C-alpha cells in the first residue's frame, strides 16, 4: 500500500486573539489547505499559560504571555505540530514555562523544544497520522543563557527551559587592528583585571595563542565586553555551532530517524550573515549537518520576515518563514521591566506603550511590509520520500488599527505574484529554482 503524506509549514505564530472564526473566502481557503495537510506545523511564539509565573528580568521586548484558549484556536485552524524552542519560551520564568507544558499536554498536542530539563527539551516528539509518523526536534539559537534548559543529576533536579543551539563567534581583523585592540585592552586596565581573575582561579589562559579575548572580568555583570578576536586577511565575523550542542541535537535527530517516516528539524534563529537576507554562517552549517544525519526538512523562523530556501541533497531548508500570525501589538499584559526598557510612563496602558514604541506606526513591524507577507510550503511525500513542494503566498492584515493587524490569509493574485517573485529571488541565492503560475502558486524544482 502506497503511503502519501503532506506537511504544511508556517513560521512564527504570535497569537493573542481568536482568529479561527473569520470566514472571508481568502481566510477560509487558507484554513482549508492547513486542514487538508496530514501534518500542519507552526512555531508557537507565545506562552499560552494564562500569565502564570513571574515576568523575567530579561526579555526580547515584552513578555509574550497569552490566554490558553489560543491553543484551541490554533487546533481549530488545523495545526497539530508545535515548535516551542524560541527566545520567548521563558518570558514568565520556569513556572510559566511549566504551565505552558501542562496546557499543551492537557490538550494532547504534539510539541517539542521545551522541557523540565535539558534532555526532555532535546528529545523529539512523534506525531502519528493515518499514513505515517513525523518526528520533530525543535531548537533555538536565539536565547538568553538562563533560558537554556539544564540537565538533572542524581542529587538535583534539572532546570526547565529551551533546547539550546549555542554557537562560537570569532571576529577576524587585520594584524594592525588586532595590535591596536590589544593596546586599548592594556591601557584600559582590563588585562590587569584578567590576570587577577586567573590568579583567583576563576579563569585560565586560552589554549590557542592566536585567539585574543577582549573581555571585562571586573564589570562582567554588565555584560558589556566579551568578544574573541583573531588575525585575518580582512575584517569578518565567523560563527560555528558549539560542538556539544550540535552533537547532542544530532544524537536525537538520529533517534528520530530510527523511529519515524519523516524527520523535521525546527530552528529558531534571529542571527543574520553579511546581509539581512543571508543566514549566519553557523545556521547554514547546522542545517546541512542536520540533513547529513537524517533530517528530511529543516524549517527556520525567528527574524519575523521571509528568507529564501535551499535544496541540499534533495531536501529543503527554509531559512525563515517569517510571521504567520503577528499579534505582537496585542500583548495583553506588560511587565514593569518592559515599561522601563521602552522608556515610557508606567501609568500607560499596553496599547499606548506600543503606539509610542512604533511612533504611531512609523517604525517597527507596522511600517515595513516585509513583516506582513510570507509563504506556506506544502511538502508532499510518498513512502517517506519528498516528491514535491508547493508554495502558497500568505499575506497578513495590516489595517490602520493594531487590533486589525497580523491575521493571515491566502494572498490575492496581485500580492501573491509579488511575494512569489521575492521568494524566487531570495531562494536563487542558494541556487534553488522556484517557479510559479499566473495565480501566484509556486513549485520548487527538486
Image: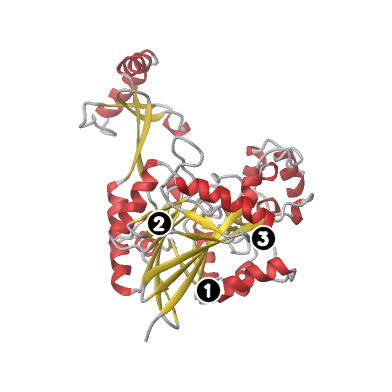
The percent coordinates of residue 355 (x first, y second) are: 75, 43
Q: Is residue 419 above or below residue 278?
A: below
- In this view, the residue in front, 419 or 349, is 419
Which residue appears farthest toward the bottom when viewing the image?
Answer: 1
Residue 16 — which label? 3
Q: Secondary structure at mark 3?
A: loop
Q: Quadrant of residue 346?
A: top right
Measured in 3D between alpha carbons, the distance from the residue under mark 3 to the one under mark 1, in whole angstroms, is: 24 Å
Q: Which mark is residue 37?
A: 1
Q: Quadrant of residue 48?
A: bottom right
- Image vertical order of residue 153 relative to residue 236, above or below: below
Q: Residues within 10 Å of mark 2 (few under 14, many from 20)?
A: many
In contact (CB < 8 Å): disc 2 and disc 1: no
**Disc number placed over residue 181 in the picture, else none:** none
Q: Position of residue 207 (x, y in %)?
A: 20, 32
Q: CA distance from mark 2 to mark 1?
A: 27 Å
Q: Classify 10 Å Cα crowding around label 3: few (below 14), some (14-19), many (20 and above).
A: many
- Spatial separation of the CA atoms under disc 2 and disc 3: 24 Å
Depth order, front residue of 317/432: 432
Residue at label 2? 163
Q: Is residue 351 visible?
A: yes
Amino acid at each position: 500500500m502506497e503511503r502519501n503524506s503532506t506537511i504544511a509549514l508556517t513560521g512564527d505564530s504570535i497569537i493573542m486573539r481568536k482568529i479561527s472564526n473569520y470566514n472571508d473566502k481568502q481566510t477560509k481557503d487558507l484554513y482549508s489547505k492547513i486542514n487538508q495537510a496530514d501534518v500542519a506545523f507552526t512555531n508557537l511564539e507565545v506562552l499560552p499559560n494564562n500569565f502564570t509565573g513571574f515576568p523575567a528580568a530579561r526579555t526580547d521586548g515584552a513578555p509574550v504571555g497569552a490566554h490558553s484558549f489560543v491553543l484551541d484556536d490554533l487546533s481549530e485552524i488545523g495545526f497539530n505540530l508545535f515548535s516551542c524552542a524560541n527566545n520567548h519560551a521563558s518570558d514568565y520564568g520556569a513556572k510559566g514555562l511549566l504551565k505552558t507544558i501542562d496546557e499543551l499536554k492537557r490538550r494532547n498536542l504534539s510539541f517539542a523544544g521545551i522541557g523540565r530539563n535539558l534532555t526532555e527539551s532535546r528529545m523529539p516528539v512523534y506525531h502519528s497520522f493515518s499514513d505515517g509518523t513525523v518526528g520533530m526536534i525543535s531548537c533555538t539559537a536565539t536565547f538568553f543563557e538562563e533560558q537554556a534548559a539544564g540537565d538533572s543529576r542524581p542529587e538535583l533536579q534539572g532546570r526547565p527551559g529551551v533546547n539550546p543551539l549555542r554557537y562560537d563567534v570569532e571576529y577576524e581583523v587585520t594584524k594592525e587592528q588586532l595590535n591596536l585592540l590589544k593596546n586599548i585592552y592594556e591601557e584600559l586596565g582590563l588585562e590587569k583585571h584578567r590576570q587577577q581573575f586567573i590568579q583567583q582561579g576563576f579563569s585560565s589562559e586560552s589554549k590557542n595563542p592566536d585567539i585574543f579575548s577582549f573581555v571585562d572580568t571586573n564589570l562582567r555583570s554588565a555584560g558589556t565586553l566579551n568578544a574573541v578576536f583573531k588575525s585575518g586577511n580582512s575584517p569578518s565575523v565567523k560563527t560555528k555551532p558549539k560542538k556539544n550542542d550540535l552533537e547532542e541535537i544530532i544524537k536525537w535527530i538520529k533517534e528520530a530517524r530510527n523511529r519515524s517516516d519523516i524527520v523535521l528539524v525546527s530552528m529558531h534563529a534571529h542571527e543574520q550573515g553579511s546581509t539581512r537576507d543571508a543566514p549566519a554562517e553557523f545556521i547554514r552549517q547546522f542545517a546541512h549537518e542536520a540533513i547529513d544525519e537524517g533530517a528530511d526538512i529543516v524549517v527556520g523562523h525567528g527574524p519575523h520576515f521571509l528568507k529564501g530556501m535551499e535544496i541540499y541533497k534533495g531536501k529543503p531548508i527554509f531559512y525563515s518563514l517569517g510571521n504567520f500570525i503577528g499579534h505582537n501589538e496585542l500583548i495583553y499584559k506588560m511587565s514593569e521591566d518592559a515599561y522601563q526598557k521602552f522608556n515610557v510612563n508606567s501609568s500607560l496602558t499596553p496599547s499606548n506603550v506600543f503606539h509610542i514604541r512604533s511612533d504611531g506606526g512609523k517604525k517597527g513591524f507596522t511600517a515595513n511590509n516585509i513583516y506582513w507577507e510570507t509563504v506556506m510550503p506544502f511538502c508532499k511525500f510518498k513512502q517517506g520520500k519528498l516528491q514535491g513542494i508547493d508554495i502558497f503566498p500568505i499575506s497578513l492584515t495590516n489595517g490602520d488599527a493594531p487590533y486589525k493587524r497580523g491575521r493571515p490569509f491566502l494572498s490575492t493574485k496581485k500580492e501573491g505574484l509579488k511575494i512569489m517573485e521575492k521568494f524566487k529571488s531570495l531562494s536563487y541565492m542558494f541556487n534553488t529554482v522556484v517557479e510559479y503560475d499566473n495565480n501566484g502558486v509556486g513549485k520548487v524544482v527538486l
